[in-house]
Amino acid sequence: MKITSATVVFVLAMAMAAALPAVAAESAATYPSKPIRIMGQGAGSTADYLSRFLGQKLTERWGQPVIVENKSGGNTVIATDAVAKAAPDGHTLLLTAMPFALNPLLIDKLPYDSANDLVPVTLLTTIPNILAIHPDFPAKNMKELIDAARANPGSVSFASTGQATSTHLSAELFAKMANVKLTHVPYRGSAPAHQDVLSGRVPIMFDNGMLQHIKAAKMRAIGVTSATRVPWLPDVPTIAEQGLTGYDAVAWYGIFATGGTKPEIIGKLATDITWAIRSADIATKLTAMGANAEGGTPEQFRQYLANEVSRWGGLVKELGLKAD
């Protein structure tokens, strides 16, 4: 048989094609091969704490350092853009929250394509917000709060950690369902918001970071935003229980990788991160923060994201919200 140059090219092409599955399997088997970076939000934020809990646990499992880099600002856009433009090898991850899913509705021109430049890995946590009121505010329960807001529309203000965050949308959903007008006072992050709420300058906040202040009697918890009560505040009824039937709003955090990362690596990440977030030591830390451990497959997280956009997109458009 005469061996032509075309024959050589064909044989080489077939050999390379046959080797592809083995290469893919090897890349997943040897991942991670270098330090991993998790892009989170501001230092001291819930995202920062989650990144560090997770990073420590994954370092133990992988034998590679997991480095947390805080890139706050831009309604999560700055951190997201850094991951979108990283090498698609699974070594740069994004830990982010609800604004990521809603940013295409809030920002006219993003520096990345949410659908293609980022890949969902797994849902990390869901965190019910608590409707907390300063002790000096005259309303002692949800009914009294609604009555006060109806008596003087716009006179009751609430703090949030920014436009279209769970702390903002939880309050807007409450106002819509209760048929009241509240005044939104947005802050750049939780620290300045908490400072003004604890001082009484702004009387109420729907937030998941007030647990320690509630237990210290610096704030009064009058409602839980999730559909069911939470074990860390078992005596506090849900908002739905108190007359707003169907009310349900929780914060969430999840992990994303750069678009184009191999499915085998995405699968390994989802498995290992689920193991970490559901481990007994991290679960204990989450409970102390008022958070639920989640985890799961990339497809489950993708469906969760679609549901969140469907759930909140209408309210965002109705209110005409845009990112700061």
Image (tube, rainbow, N blue to C red):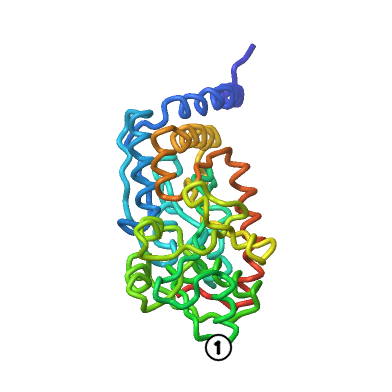
Relative placement, left or right, of 261 versus 51 is right
Identified by mark 1, the residue type is Asn
Given residues 221 and 44, the one toward you in this image is: 221
Relative placement, left or right, of 289 versus 145 is left
Element carrying mark 1: loop
Residue at the far right in the pictured view: 245
Q: Which residue is mark 1?
A: 152
* Percent x, y of residue 271: 51, 32
* Percent x, y of residue 4: 59, 21
Given residues 288 and 76, the one toward you in this image is: 288
Q: What residue is drawn where x is 55% and y is 68%? A: 169
Asked which quadrant contains residue 242, the reply is bottom right
Instruction: Give the position of the C terminus as an image quadrant.
Output: bottom left
Given residues 82 and 102, the one toward you in this image is: 102
Given residues 141 and 92, the one toward you in this image is: 141
Asked which quadrant contains residue 66, the reply is top left
Instruction: Give the position of the N terminus as an image quadrant.
Output: top right
Residue at the far top in the pictured view: 1
Relative placement, left or right, of 150 versus 68 is right
Q: What residue is drawn where x is 64% and y is 54%? A: 306
Q: Is residue 45 depicted above or below 24 in this figure? A: below
Asked which quadrant contains residue 78, the reply is bottom left
Q: What residue is drawn where x is 50% and y is 59%? A: 129
Q: Is residue 163 depicted above or below 149 in this figure? A: above
- Other residues around mark 1 within 10 Å, as few (<14) / some (14–19) / many (≥20): few
Counting every numbered tag in the picture gives 1
* Percent x, y of residue 148: 55, 81
* Percent x, y of residue 210: 40, 60
Q: Is residue 156 depicted above or below 163 in this figure? A: below
